Amino acid sequence: MTDIATIVASERTIQIKHPATGAPLGLALTIRPDSHPEVKKARRAIFNERLKADAPASAEQLEEGQTSVMVAAVAAWEWSGDATYRGKKPRLDESTLREVLSTLPWVRDQLATELGNDAAFFPS
């Protein structure tokens, strides 16, 4: 018998890959599932802001909201080998993560794809 209450999503680690070759670059992100409290908090803040707004959201506001959810979903990052960002192995903070996601759309795309893969958050 399977107790469905024991089937819960958990954090997982993904490897960021070169956009052309698919080779791992040495940047690993630990990402949280959509059900994680930090991700839920970010999503709710965006919804609440939109509910208070007098006008429809702009494209920039929608993109900023998506970025906020992505930032909340990244629990950690690890730089290995010779992988760097602007010559450094930066520590994870919101500002640097936002910068990476805005200046490297291929990293953002890979993160979005992995966050959308709900099944991968459930250990088998």
Image (cartoon, rainbow, N blue to C red):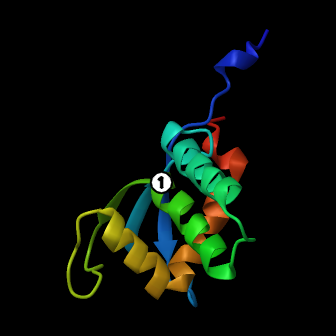
Q: Quadrant of residue 97?
A: bottom left
Q: Is residue 111 visible?
A: no
In which quadrant is the N terminus drawn? top right
Q: Position of residue 83 (x, y in %)?
A: 30, 79
Write the residue at 65% across / 55% down.
52
58 vs 111, left or right, is right
The residue that mark 1 highlights is: 72
Write the residue at 50% across / 53% down.
73
- Which class describes the residues within 10 Å of circle 1: few (<14), some (14-19), or many (20+)? many
In which quadrant is the C terminus drawn? top right
Question: For the image shown, how many numbered marks are present on the structure?
Answer: 1
From what the image shows, is residue 4 above or below residue 54?
above
Write the residue at 51% across / 47% down.
12
Q: Is residue 74 visible?
A: yes
Amino acid type assigned to the residue bearing label 1 in the image: Ala
Viewer-proximal residue among 72 and 28: 72
Q: Quadrant of residue 110?
A: bottom right
Q: Position of residue 117 (x, y in %)?
A: 70, 55
Q: Position of residue 80 (x, y in %)?
A: 28, 68
Residue sticking out furthest to the bottom: 20
Residue sticking out furthest to the top: 1
Residue sticking out furthest to the right: 1
Q: Position of residue 71 (x, y in %)?
A: 46, 61
From what the image shows, is residue 31 above or below residue 41?
below
Write the residue at 68% across / 25% down.
7
Q: Secondary structure at mark 1?
A: helix
